[in-house]
Amino acid sequence: MAIVFDGTRESYVEGLSEFLGSGQEDTPEWVADLRREAISGFGELGFPTLSDEEWRFTNLEALRRGSFSIAEDGISDVSMKTVNSYGFSGLDCLRLVFVNGRFASSLSDAGYTREGIVVKALSEAIREDGDLVKDYLAKYADYEKDAFISLNTSYFEDGVFVYVPDQTVFEKPVHVLHVSTDEGRPLFINPRNLIVIGQSSDAKVIEHYVSLSQSVYFSNVVTEVVCGENANLEHYRLEFESQKAFNFSTLRVNQQKNSNIASHSILYGGAIVRNNVHPVLAGEGCNSDIYGLFMSEGRQHMDNFMRVEHASPHCDSRQFYNGVLDGRSKGVFHGRILVHEGAEKTDAKQTNRNLLLSDTAQIDTKPQLEIYNDDVKCTHGATIGQMDEEALFYLCSRGISMKTAKIIMLRAFTNQTLEHMSIDSVREALENTVMKWFEQRLGNGDGR
Amino acid sequence: MLEVKNLHVRVDDKEILKGMNITVAPGEVHSIMGPNGSGKSTLAQVLAGKEAYEVTEGEVTFQGKDLLDLEPEERACEGIFLAFQYPVEIPGVANTYLLREALNAKREYREEKPLKHVEFGKLARDKMKALGIGEDLLKRSVNAGFSGGEKKRNEIFQMQILEPTLAVLDETDSGLDIDALKIVANGVNSMRDSGRSFIVITHYQRLLNYIVPDFVHVMVDGKIVKSGGKELAQELEEKGYADF
Ligand SMILES: Nc1ncnc2c1ncn2[C@@H]1O[C@H](COP(=O)(O)OP(=O)(O)OP(=O)(O)O)[C@@H](O)[C@H]1O
Ligand SMILES: [Mg+2]
């Protein structure tokens, strides 16, 4: 019997005991306790409303009215061939596949457990490496303050666990492919990923969300990252969910002294999408580079919520987000930079550029600086505009068709963020996807 | 080759060209001079197909075709090239990329095979040398952060690659130092032949010492008020436009 949530706060709160009783029997007690604690957090919070300052631009009424249920088993619907089609050509990586939130071992590479490195499904890690997981899981993503983190912490099923010990460079990018399928009713899927990088260690993780159908579902992702002293992480979130999905995700990063992260968020699918990126630069001398590209069309709604927290001196952060909006879609860029007392010599920069392809697309861009310190450098800038007519004319005057000229301009715009990706095959795959998207937008005409 | 008859053009309800006439035969170089705001750039942009300019009267034929009927890219493929007075900066689009796309668009229009990367590279390098353009300029974004002179040289470089039948140079000499001026002039002169024509818009007779025109026209308030040979430029240099 499937567990069904009718959209009310009570249904999510009350559903947990049933969830714990079905299929979760072999989870350790500390995890069950964590889930219970988290759901009481949700009980207090409920879904945010428009009167909540951080949700002013994103209406969750449809989510509150929707009925969703925990997935049964979609794994058998997914073939190896399908999974391979989401690969990145020529990339030597370690692939873990999850279907509707559950680990699909038959579609995944064998886990990696050598030289102290652990890459495996979180569910397995909880059973086999419990002490390790326990030190980090839910220690950073605050389930008492954020409703979606509470729900995820209560109902997460699986995701990736990456642990790289000190002084270790893990060369292979980890490709975490989350696939959703149509089980005939709207699903509630809670992927949970945990990435721990030790001192002076390196890793690359690609979170990739795809859907095999254009069905309605509610996916709610939480990824926690702990980046040790002097460690480097490059993280990708490639969101290609169904056009009808509700997709919420949080990337919560804790950065220790002199660590570097580069985060890339690509938002492409989803009906209502909210992507939270929340690095805390906890140690001195950290560097956070946060890149994002969102593309919306039709009635898609994409909300990018940044919270960059400078908690120590001498840290640099860069936010660089570009949006391309078509149709009647709506975008939000909410860029919050929080500089704590004592975080001297902070250098924080934020740029959000938006390109509107139609008269009916809309973007709300809002910088928010909260600075409790005098010795900081914070800059922000946002632009909203149409494609540059002068540049288009210049290209056409050289013999290039209007359609190609537009594609060239769009590519130049999207490359401003994509060019920062260090994994070439991922960047190239995205460039192709972006191109196809543009071509669809421009239709069959001559581009005028 | 080009025939402009009684051309009237307005932008934002303001008439700028007020009965413009000019006829250019194959192989000829025409120079248009005239005070600021007289409509020289407007004519150039209208020939290239800029949409914001509304043609209210008159006609333009180019090699027997109604030019006003064609989109800007079709005009370019038919052989028209405009060297912009203010070349547009396009960050994120490499100069080479624009050029290869442009050249291949033109070749496709003529039903020729696209040039391969190496072939294009060789072609570009040969032309660059002559214009004193460094390799790095090719890789950089189109005109982005180029100096004034670099932008103008880049326009001439594009012209050389695209080999137009009619090139309109809008103040390509402005902002060039004397050496660059000679380089640009040589670039133009090396392309002069019996089948190719130029319209050179300039404020300075200096350029015309290097690119010797067959005809000089004076444009005032949206039309040609006087035409003559190259000696007219000298006359204007001395007397200015006060007589018109
Ligand atoms: N888009 C526009 N909107 C309004 N007025 C315009 C526009 N474009 C041109 N004009 C006006 O048309 C007139 C002619 O401009 P144009 O640029 O053709 O002059 P020009 O002869 O090239 O001048 P210069 O020698 O300074 O380059 C000017 O008065 C200019 O202000
Ligand atoms: Mg002008």
Image (cartoon, rainbow, N blue to C red):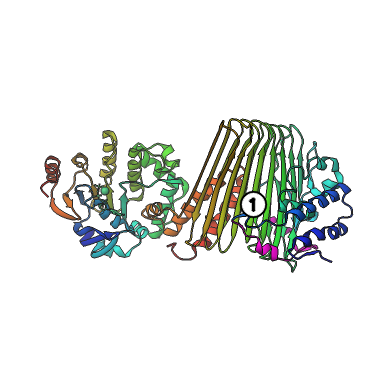
| Segment colored magenta | A57-86
Task: Please report the residue visible at 35 percent of the width from the left and 50 percent of the height from the top.
Answer: B162
Identify the image quadrant of residue A71.
bottom right
Classify A309 as above or below B16.
Answer: above
**In magenta segment, residue B99:** no
Q: Is residue B82 left or right of residue A355?
A: left
Q: Amino acid at mark 1?
A: Asn
* Relative image position of residue A268 (x, y in whole percent): 60, 56
* Relative image position of residue B54 (x, y in whole percent): 29, 62
Residue A5 visible in the snapshot: yes
Task: Please report the residue visible at 34 percent of the width from the left and 45 percent of the height from the top.
Answer: B155
* Relative image position of residue A49 (x, y in whole percent): 65, 57
Q: Nearer the viewer, residue B163 or A94?
A: A94
Q: Nearer the viewer, residue A414 or B166?
A: A414
Task: Please report the residue visible at 22 percent of the width from the left and 58 percent of the height from the top.
Answer: B17
Classify A351 as above or below A405.
Answer: above
Dot 1 falls on a residue whose secondary structure is strand
Quarter of the image with the N terminus of chain B is bottom left
- Disc 1 marks which residue? A275
Q: Is residue A374 left or right of residue A383?
A: right
**In magenta segment, residue A73:** yes
Q: Is residue B128 left or right of residue A218?
A: left
